[in-house]
Amino acid sequence: MEEVYPKGKTVLYARVASRDQKADLERQVERLQIFAREQGLEEWTVVTEIGSGLNGRRRKLLKVLRDTKVSRIVVEHRDRLARFGFEMVEAALASAGKQIVVVEEGEVRDDLVQEILEILTSACGRLYGRRSARDRARKAVEVLQCG
């Protein structure tokens, strides 16, 4: 059975955690565009962002979420939109007649290590000072990966 989409603007939203993943971002956009064409979505806008999925203040995503003309947001994986709270965002948008379309329901952990490193760096910075925070966080991630 073919998916029925609400009328309105479609946004293809792609996100990676860091600038060194730019090639991944481009591949993500390509896959989203292929999906949109296959689904018969005729017009869309591509929005790309570099930032942690844990960051609730991503400027471009917030702009998309606030845009009253956007009726659907297409993401490759749920974690591209949000690491946590996806269901709440989805429910809030649904109550406004909007839809999130997830291309691949399977979970992906591409940049989770990078995001954990960011959290640990922040915590270590508060505990030990900014100077040694990055090194301590990196060592903690290495221990976690080996354990």
Image (cartoon, helix red, strand yellow):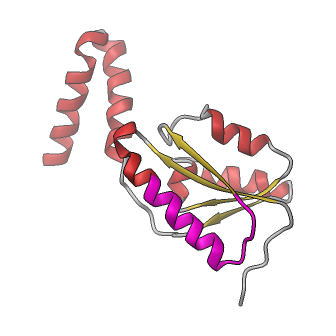
Depth order, front residue of 102/121: 102
Snapshot quadrant of residue 1: bottom right
Q: Position of residue 4 (x, y in %)?
A: 79, 78
Question: In the image, residue 87 lies at what x, y percent?
Answer: 64, 55
Q: Please give the name of the residue rendered at 36% of the width and 22% of the height, measured from the top-left corner.
A: 123
Is residue 38 shown above or below 69?
Answer: below
Query: In the current view of this chain or complex, which residue is farthest to the bottom?
Result: 1
| In the rendered image, the vertical position of residue 134 relative to residue 39, given as above or below | above
Relative image position of residue 112 (x, y in whole percent): 37, 47
Is 4 inside the magenta-drawn segment? no
Q: Name the outermost residue toward the left.
A: 146
Prevailing secondary structure class for the magenta stretch in the rendered image: helix
Q: Residue at x 85, y 51 (%)?
A: 69
In this rendering, the answer to whether 55 lies above or below 14 is above
Is residue 39 visible to the viewer in this orientation of the structure?
yes
| Viewer-nearest residue: 60 or 56 | 60
Is residue 33 magenta-colored? yes
Q: Does residue 117 appear left or right of residue 16 in this picture?
A: left
Q: Which residue is nearer to you in this view: 126 or 58?
A: 58
Range covered by the magenta-colored residues? 26-44
Q: Residue at x 72, y 86 (%)?
A: 2
Q: Answer yes or no: is residue 147 visible.
A: no
Q: Is residue 84 left or right of residue 118?
A: right
Name which residue lies at 27% across and 18% down.
133
- Image height check: is 114 above or below 95? above
Task: Indicate left or right for 49 with 113 as reference.
Answer: right
- Percent position (x, y) of residue 89? 69, 50
Of 110 and 140, the residue lying toward us: 110
